[in-house]
Image (cartoon, grey):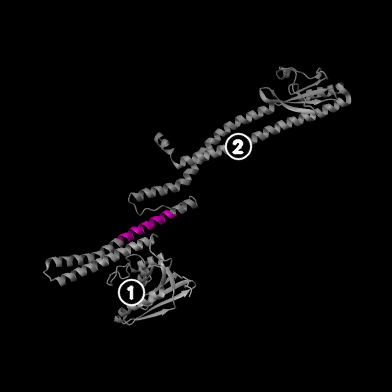
Amino acid sequence: MSLKSLLESRHTLAFRLTLWYAFFFVVSALITFQVFFVMTSAYNRAATDSELIMEYDEFAAFYGQGGVEALRGAIELEVRLEGADRFFFRLLGPEGQELLATEKAAWQALLADGDDLGELRPGSAYTLYPLPYGGYRHGAHGLSGKMGSDVTCQIVISRQKGEHFLETLRDVFHLVLLIVVIMAAATGLFMARRALAGVKEISRAAQEIAAGALDRRVAIMTGGKEITELADTFNTMLDRINLLIKGMAEMTDNIAHDLKSPVTRMRAMAEMALVDERDALERQGLAADIVEQCDMLLELINAMLFISEAEAGAAVFQKSRVDMARVVEDACELFMPLAEDKKIALEMALTGPCLVAGNLNLLQRMVANLLDNALKYSHEGGLVKVSLTPEQGRVVLRFQDNGMGIGAEDTPHIFDRFYRCDQSRTKPGSGLGLSLVRAIVGAHDGEIRVASSLGQGSTFTVILPLLPSPPQ
């Protein structure tokens, strides 16, 4: 790896994860060793103190039984067993004069500042204390205790071997810690790279997609549940983006088709008004046709804007108490002449007032679109039935016809913008009617369902929240 690559790797997530892993690993090792070292040191020192107390009790018993002579024999035996360089004892009289003592040659450094090794605390049978010895702060432990009413003893036991062991243990740990740091860094780097392998694959895929490879997908890896879920989500997002791009392309084609015809007609009418010599009445008729075409375009544009706002949750409109029974009744009365012209029976089944919180104009348009759709796709002599019933705190509005119906392959798409079951576009319309209906229903916290069979008719069901009736 080049120096430049090493310098750039400092800013990578893998490098930071490696540092954090090594840091916590080393800190954990330090804490573990410190606890172990402190406990080992305390245990060794406590063992030395226990040995001192045991020796004191034994020597006090000898002194009580036979005085200084009996104690002398016990001390000489202890020196032969332990060695003069590890065990020191002396007996002091009332004036501090030395009555009995072991060999002092090995303890000159300890006795250099005077013969006072440690003082007995008042009121205590004995006192324990650490002593610097052999280059160690706690190289020896001492005990001062009473032997009778006016005699005291001082016992010192060397701890050089114990302190040397602790020092060696500390040195070994420093070496082990260096190895641990190297292993922790290597392990952390391996684990970080392995954990981030999926993220790198997704990053590469995103870069290729940004460069134009829209068909690129991330291979599903076994790098853990989180990475697999991320890859799945990323692929799902790409599929959704591709569908949106495809839908936008289709919508653009549909918009161009639906806008081209009225714009062309308006231009032709304007040219005719400019070129032909017509009277004022004919010019007014052309102007009226142009206004009508403009209104159609404005209606199409406004519908598209409302659908976009409703789908984004940004539609803003005033709500009031609306009686859906009255809305349905007015719509059926308005479309009755059209139904009679097509010899279609239009029936209503209304169950009293059904109040909802909504916008009257939008709800009227929703009902009109669904009723117009039912009549448009019904055969001559057919039947269109509109029913309205309150059910369990909801308003259920159904539009049922026995017309041409909708194919199973078209049913999932009929609410999409500009989608036309009639791909030849022989039927009038822009393909926005049902999209607008769904947007209006969604903006009123409702839902719309469709059940249809090809050649047997369709049933559109609108469900809206029901408001309680006002008190009489």
- Asked which quadrant contains residue 412, the reply is bottom left
- Please state the extent of the stretch shown in magenta in the rendering: 232-250
Question: Going by the picture, which residue comes out furthest to the left?
Answer: 277
Left or right of 105? Residue 213 is: left
Q: Amino acid at mark 1?
A: Asp
Q: Position of residue 223 (x, y in %)?
A: 48, 50
Badge 1 local density, few (<14 within 10 Å), some, or many (20+)? some
For residue 223: magenta? no
Compare residues 187 and 252 and report the one nearer the observer: 252
Q: Position of residue 55 (x, y in %)?
A: 79, 28
The residue that disc 1 covers is 372
Q: Position of residue 229 (x, y in %)?
A: 46, 54
Q: Position of residue 9 (x, y in %)?
A: 43, 38
Considering only vertical position in the picture, is 126 above or below 197?
above
Badge 2 local density, few (<14 within 10 Å), some, or many (20+)? few
Left or right of 101? Residue 329 is: left
Evaluate whether residue 414 shows in this view.
no
**Labels 1 and 2 touching (C-beta < 8 A):** no
Q: What element does badge 1 sit on?
A: helix
Compare residues 182 and 335 and report the one nearer the observer: 335
Question: Going by the picture, which residue comes out furthest to the right?
Answer: 65
Q: Amino acid at mark 2?
A: Ile
Considering only vertical position in the picture, is 172 above or below 93?
below
Q: Report the disc number at residue 31.
A: 2
- Marks 1 and 2 sit apart, C-alpha to C-alpha, by 79 Å
Q: What element does badge 2 sit on?
A: helix
